[in-house]
Amino acid sequence: MRLIAAALVIVLSTAVEGWTASTKRYLVGFKSGVSSMARSQKLQALGAKTLATIKSNGTSNDEFEAYVVEAPADAAVTPKSRQPARPSFKMDIFGASQDFAAGVGADDDMIVEEDVRVNWIQSEPMALRAMPLPTMAAFTGGLAKFTPFSAIKGEIPWGVKRVRAPAAWDVTEGKGVKVAVIDTGIKADHPDLNGQVVSGFNAITDSEADGAWTDDNGHGTHVAGTIAAKRDGKGVVGVAPQVKLYAVKVLDAEGSGTISDIVRGIIWAANNNVQVANMSLGSSLPSDLMRRAVRYASGRGMVVVAAAGNSGGAVGYPAAYPETIAVSASDGDDKLAEFSSRGPEVDFVAPGHYIVSTWPNNNTVSLSGTSMAAPHMTGLAALAVAQGARGLGGPDGVFAALKKAAKTIGLPPEQEGNGMVDASKLVE
């Protein structure tokens, strides 16, 4: 039996705290050039109550602004399907938003999307794929049996060795690079992460208070360990053990969050000058406003690394956006992991099978998924940033450095993109 930490699952909840049967929540954005007064007037015309504003701190030529609003549920008419660029199945949640906008007099200056609650991750035994996301308590004390002997020897997990991170450490361990983990939070006092997490933000509660962004699921802590677990001869070590981690909690204990939670987390990271962000999460339908947020972050110089997904099919979102670095997952034999999504959007492949990393019980566990592959690439991107790649064209400069350091492993291009990065090539 093995565990999969998926980055591509949609599960809509039947209820969201604070929502009522008579109202729905929407995320509303405006095209550039629409004045603040005009935005206010258009929102009033919708009959919508503004619950929150998500706003960048950029200049007039570098900004993002969206509104979380509540409106009567009966404002929407019969949904019309809005197909994604590469539909894997049909859902009407975004089409309903468009009909809401049309039904109450919105115009071409507005983007309106229903702010649905989605389960963006899933961790489960392969044999029980239909089961809901296990709680942290269900994992505690029993995960060692899922770790094959070859997965870790000493402090360095096999994936960290495979990307040859130790070969770069004499030159750089990513010291000082600001890396955000946009996920379920991080357990900052884990022995392998203690002192690695600088601060964080809970997008769900809109709080930067200490403890607000603590991981109550486990997924984010596992991702953080692969990126930046300390090099101290104990437990595990990450790809870039001297980066500064920022815990951006956008998902709750069940791995669920609204689109506005994800968007708020991306904007917070960009506003706080994060240099690299890991997004081991996704869905199979696009969001115009989430892409706008990613584009804003990229414009601010933030490198966004995203898991391709675990559907075995098309790459999910946000990984499918051209502004992100999409990562598929390989196994110990340099084959594409059977669960890994694939497609022309894949940029690189990284280890994602039986990856041992940190867990909130102050121990380590083994998980598999593109959620585990992405943080290897995030650590490598941080090493490239530490070597000055970001100064040579922002995210494009980092991508160019990673591409130069990559070598194909014999898979079709839609499975491995530019191949697997060799960290030793980043410091030549």
Image (spheres, rainbow, N blue to C red):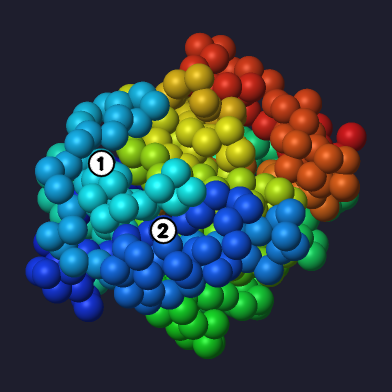
Q: As shown in the figure, which amino acid type bears the numbered disc 2?
A: Val
Is 307 on the left or on the right of 269, as rendered?
left
Measuring 53% from the left and 87% from the top, which residue is drawn there?
210
Residue 408 spot, x, y in % from top left: 63, 18
Which image quarter holds the C terminus?
top right
Residue 424 spot, x, y in % from top left: 79, 36
Measuring 51% from the left and 54% from the top, which residue is drawn there?
30
Mark 2 burial class by Cα count in 10 Å: few <14, some 14-19, many 20+: many
Q: Quadrant of residue 331?
A: top left
Is 419 on the left or on the right of 370, as rendered?
right
Q: As shown in the figure, which amino acid type bears the numbered disc 1?
A: Gly
Q: Nearer the viewer, residue 91 or 278?
A: 91
Residue 418 spot, x, y in % from top left: 63, 22
As displayed, is residue 335 above or below residue 421?
A: above
User: What is the secondary structure assignment of the residue under circle 1?
Assistant: helix
User: What is the secondary structure assignment of the residue under circle 2?
Assistant: strand
Numbered-mark total:
2
As displayed, is residue 383 above or below residue 40?
A: above
- Which mark, by number, is residue 416? none
Measuring 31% from the left and 69% from the top, which residue is drawn there?
48
Q: Quadrant of residue 245?
A: bottom right
Return the residue at label 1: 95
Return the residue at label 2: 28
